[in-house]
Image: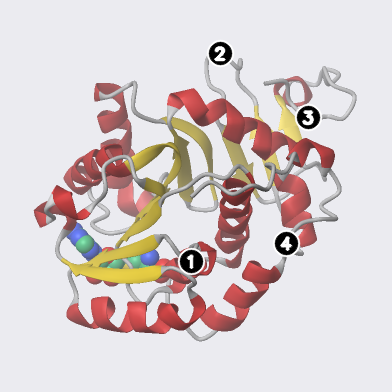
Amino acid sequence: MPSDTPPRDWREEPDGASIDHTRYTAWVDAARDVQGWYSDMSAALWDAFLGQQAAWHIEGDMVEIGCAYGRAAMMLGLHTRPEETLRLIDYKTNHVTEAPARIRPHSPGQVTAIQSYSERLDIAHLPMRGTRFMHIDGDHGRWGLHNDMALADHTLAADGLLVLDDFLAPQFMGVTLGAIEWMAQHPQSFEFIMVGFNKAYLARPRFAGEYLHFIRDALPAHLHALGHHDFSLWLTDERRACSCFGITQRQYDRDFITREFAMGKPDKRADGKPEL
Ligand SMILES: C[S@@+](CC[C@H](N)C(=O)[O-])C[C@H]1O[C@@H](n2cnc3c(N)ncnc32)[C@H](O)[C@@H]1O
């Protein structure tokens, strides 16, 4: 249900002073001994995006394909609201029993598990356009990505966020090939908004601009406030050609590296941020 609280204007909060640290801190405690392939930096990035979705009053469930021990899903569980459901999909029996049990004590919402290969999943298990955050971290192959992107297209809400694990990872080239192929065949479905720290972040084209402004105007403050300083955000192409941020370890001691800076020219904006 929509809340009566007016949406927070994140542009008024450039210093990170009002950033809520509680879920990130809770994740650090709850996930400390949970095995997995999910970094503290990814946790901080997800905390920022999920917090911003709450500030925008975005509603919907969450889905992860490939939950394993629940390390990443723990962050999703911490951000669910009581009326929301986190759906965890994995084909392994131990994962679909142990991960939800580990997350439930930390999750205000429901945590359900679906034991299945995502290729065999009955699409009716996922609410149509009812998911606000989805992580694809299962099959890791080209055709698996085709399948999982189609599931995401069915279930992701108009203002939701889709995350692909191991995008651009040399170990799993099928992820990158499969995702780009699927997107070329379905150009209206998703747009890249950020790539880095082993993941790609995608939004629906009509809402991508909101996320891009959030990345530029609020994400650095959030990361710094959580103690993550080792990053730079790159936007180095013509914005009509490619407006996807890259995020890497820190270079040139700058939060942002613009096209102008990369070409040795003066920044267009006094604050050193890229134009959008
Ligand atoms: C890299 S692990 C996921 C890591 C996890 N998200 C984390 O937070 O650490 C990949 C998981 O995907 C599951 N998996 C692999 N292929 C799958 C498929 N086609 N459908 C569903 N789950 C799959 C595996 O059983 C494994 O648990």
Pointer 2 with pointer 3, Cβ within 8 A: no
**Quadrant in which ligand 1 is drawn:** bottom left
Q: Counting residues from the N terminus, which is met first, the one under dot 1 or under dot 3?
A: 1
Q: Counting residues from the N terminus, which is met first, the one under dot 2 or under dot 4?
A: 4
Q: Residue at x 62, y 44 (%)?
A: 247
Label 1 C-beta lies within 8 Å of the nearest ligand 1 atom? yes
Percent x, y of residue 217: 75, 36
Disc 1: CA contacts within 10 A as few (<14), some (14-19) or many (>=20) = some
Q: Which residue is mark 2?
A: 240
Pointer 4 with pointer 3, Cβ within 8 A: no
Mark yes or no: residue 37 visible: no
Pointer 1 with pointer 4, Cβ within 8 A: no
Pointer 1 with pointer 2, Cβ within 8 A: no
Left or right: residue 133 versus residue 156 is: right
Q: Residue at x 79, y 59 (%)?
A: 225
Q: Nearer the viewer, residue 207 or 6?
A: 6
Question: How far is the residue under mark 1 from the one under mark 2?
Answer: 32 Å
Q: Nearer the viewer, mark 1 or mark 4?
A: 4
Q: Counting residues from the N terminus, which is met first, the one under dot 1 or under dot 4?
A: 4
Q: Residue at x 31, y 37 (%)?
A: 179
Q: Which residue is mark 4?
A: 20
Q: Which residue is mark 1?
A: 38
